[in-house]
Image (cartoon, helix red, strand yellow):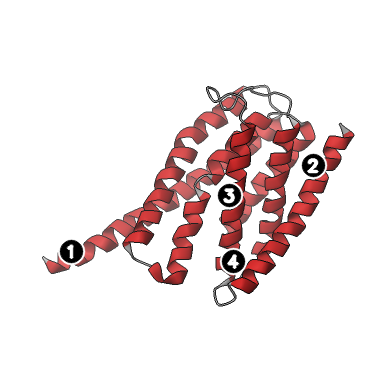
Amino acid sequence: MEEEYIRVINITVIGVISWGLIFILVRRIFSNYSFDFSTRIVSTLHATVAVALATLTIQDWSCPVCPIASRSSLQQMETMAFSLSYMIYDLICSHFDEVLSIDNAVHHSVCILGFVAGLCYRKCASEMVAALLITEISSPFLHLREILKQIGYRDTDLNLAADVCFATIFSLARMVVGPYLVYVTISADNPILIKAMALGLQLVSAFWFYKILKMMRYKVIKRSMPNKKST
């Protein structure tokens, strides 16, 4: 067991350093773009790998969160350590940006606490890896829509398509599957801290869902205005 925890710690520490080095490399390659542009490139990389790793840890596709409240496997712990390292890096990196996003900082803090608790208890990894999957699956589209704006595709059909894809995937994953996952986590024999983290993450998702609805309403109204003027 000690060897497994040492491996998890090594993945986390090396991961934080690696994410930092990747960001520095991306920043130099895209030096003409903003700080936010580089962080989104790194975030997209993490989301893509995290979704792949989370998918590989699913033991039974007929019940992706099974076995519930079970002992964590080494593969699940490694997957959580991988994303924990990214969350720590991104939380640190966000303090160097011009504007600190409070809701993003809260989201990362909740995730870090959840990962640490899950790794320490070595329990309910099936639920936590499933949560990682549904929270990160929409992230590439979230970052794509902002990246497109910075490379000159603001207010285009391509940017709108990215907005719709992000809003749809986020809504289905976090507001349809998410509440079910929270219910399963809370109703199972999991530590109280894990249950609190699950509920906290769902509340953050609900807040973001509200912001997404406002964003899509604004997009629809904005695109309908030229049509009204032409008529």
Secondary structure beneath dot 4 equals helix
Q: Nearer the viewer, residue 110 or 137?
A: 137
Q: Amino acid at mark 4?
A: Ser
Q: If you read the primary sequence from the N terminus, does the residue marked by circle 1 or circle 4 appear first? A: 4
Identify the residue position indicated by label 2 in the image. Answer: 8
Identify the residue position indicated by label 3 in the image. Answer: 47
Where is residue 137 shown, x and y percent of the image?
52, 44
Q: If you read the primary sequence from the N terminus, does the residue marked by circle 4 or circle 2 appear first? A: 2
Q: Amino acid at mark 3?
A: Ala
Q: Amino acid at mark 1?
A: Asn
Secondary structure beneath dot 1 equals helix
Q: Is residue 38 visible?
A: yes
Q: CA distance from mark 1 to mark 3?
A: 37 Å
Q: CA distance from mark 2 to mark 3?
A: 19 Å
* Mark 4 crowd level (few <14, some 14–19, many ≥20, 10 Å Cα): many
Residue at 43 percent across and 67 percent down: it is 149
Q: If you read the primary sequence from the N terminus, does the residue marked by circle 2 or circle 1 appear first? A: 2
Q: Nearer the viewer, residue 108 or 76?
A: 76
The reply to whether callout 4 and callout 2 are in contact (CB within 8 Å) is: no
Where is residue 186 shown, x and y percent of the image?
61, 27
- The image quadrant that residue 187 belongs to is top right
Question: In the drawing, does residue 87 fall left or right of residue 223?
Answer: right
- The image quadrant that residue 103 belongs to is bottom right
Q: CA distance from mark 4 to mark 3?
A: 14 Å
Identify the residue position indicated by label 4 in the image. Answer: 38
Q: Which mark is residue 227?
A: 1
Q: Which mark is residue 166?
A: none
Where is residue 118 shown, x and y percent of the image?
72, 35
The reply to whether callout 2 and callout 3 are in contact (CB within 8 Å) is: no
Secondary structure beneath dot 2 equals helix
Q: From the viewer's perspective, is the residue at label 1 or at label 4 nearer?
A: 4
Q: From the viewer's perspective, is the residue at label 2 or at label 1 nearer?
A: 2
